Amino acid sequence: MLEELLQLQEIAVEEILATNQLKALEDLRVKYLGRKSRLRNIMSSLGGLPTDQRPKIGQAAGEAQKAIQTAIASQMSLIRETEESSSYIDVTLPGRVPDLGAPHPLIRLSYELTDIFRGMGFELFEGPETEDEYHNFDALNTPKDHPARDLHDTFYLEAGGLLRTHTSTVQIRLMENRQPPIRMISLGRCYRKETVDATHHFAFHQMEGLFVDHNVSFADLKGTIEAMGRQLLGPKTQVRFRSHFFPFTEPSVEYDFSCSLCHGASKECRICKGTGWIEIAGAGMVDPAVFESVGYDPENYTGFAFGMGLERIAMIRYGIDDVRLFLENDLRFIRQFSNLR
């Protein structure tokens, strides 16, 4: 039995020192020191041995147990040190540079336009995207039987109201609560029932402006639009005015900017359709009927209003040929603008 204990101790210590996993080490502890282990069986049988053999066998069993416990403790410490060193963080290494966000091209453009118009004395105002028919149509000289409503077909809500088709609603709300002089801009999302393609979307962003005071003229309107276009797109940008009709302005015009994508050289340009011009939006002198709806005296005040689609201006400026890209949330598209200043 003495030789068996010495052999058991040697095998156990050798096997313990060869393992490098805590789970395997725990299994070996149970194998050699557990209740059902061979060492425990020998120690529990000491009482049945002859009296002259008990001291030697008992001493050998105790030494074997101590050697196995020492080997387990030593190997456990070594395994833990190895695991800690493998997860060690070297603080001298260069850190990971986090991905920095950047404004969406439409947000960036809205900031720049706001700065341009503030430089000309305009204030920024915002209004709700859900509107009623009065502020969206009636107060803007577009009653229910007016054919212009067909061009502003929008989304009506079950609880009542509708999604605004333009930001002109903010102009009405402001004039209802403030007397002239007014020099304001408003921007935000608008909605119309459009067939989605490269140049149209059911959701779009619009900026509008309004200037009301004594003796405001069409020349003031033209100068404002030209100053905005050239500050935004460069001094070589051309601006074109065309006669048009809007129920809330008289006289009315549409204004275009020259196409910076093809410069009028391509008949297949998806943006300007080969004309060299991109329609931005409409403008004109405020119709007296609109002033009457908000309680202004059209004999004492005149004013002009203008609007523009942010998507169309962004398409001109950045050479984007599909309006759908703005709302698809594709990071590959957005990241192209992260280095712009």
Image (cartoon, rainbow, N blue to C red):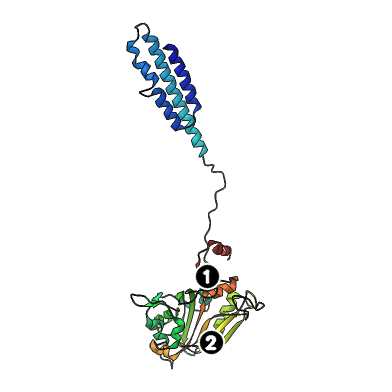
Viewport quadrant of the N terminus: top left
Residue 97, position as x, y percentages in the image = 55, 53
User: Residue shown at 54%/50% (left/top)?
Assistant: 96
Q: Which residue is mark 2?
A: 253
| SS under mark 1 | helix
Nearer-the-camera pick, 54 or 185: 54
- Give the crowd class for mark 1: few <14, some 14-19, many >=20 residues within 10 Å: some
Q: In the picture shown, does residue 157 fall above or below 329?
A: below
Image quarter in which the C terminus is found: bottom right
Tag 1: amino acid: Arg
User: How far apart are the two marked residues, 1 and 2, measured between alpha carbons?
Assistant: 27 Å
Q: Earlier in the sequence, mark 1 or mark 2?
A: 2
Residue 189 is situated, as x and y percent measured from the top left of the image, at: 46, 73
The percent coordinates of residue 305 (x first, y second) are 49, 84
Residue type at mark 2 is Val
User: Relative to 21, is 229 above or below?
Assistant: below
**Residue 79 vs residue 180, the one in the foreground:** 79
Q: Nearer the viewer, mark 1 or mark 2?
A: 1
Secondary element at image label 2: strand
Which residue is located at x 42 percent, y 80 percent? 169
Q: Residue furthest top?
A: 52
Is residue 154 in view?
Answer: yes
Residue 104: horizontal and vertical position, in percent? 52, 66
Which residue is denoted by mark 1 in the rendering? 324
Q: Is residue 65 above or below residue 179?
A: above
Please indicate, yes or no, whether residue 181 appears anywhere in the rendered image: no
- Label 1 with label 2: CB-CB less than 8 Å: no
Please count the marks in the image.
2
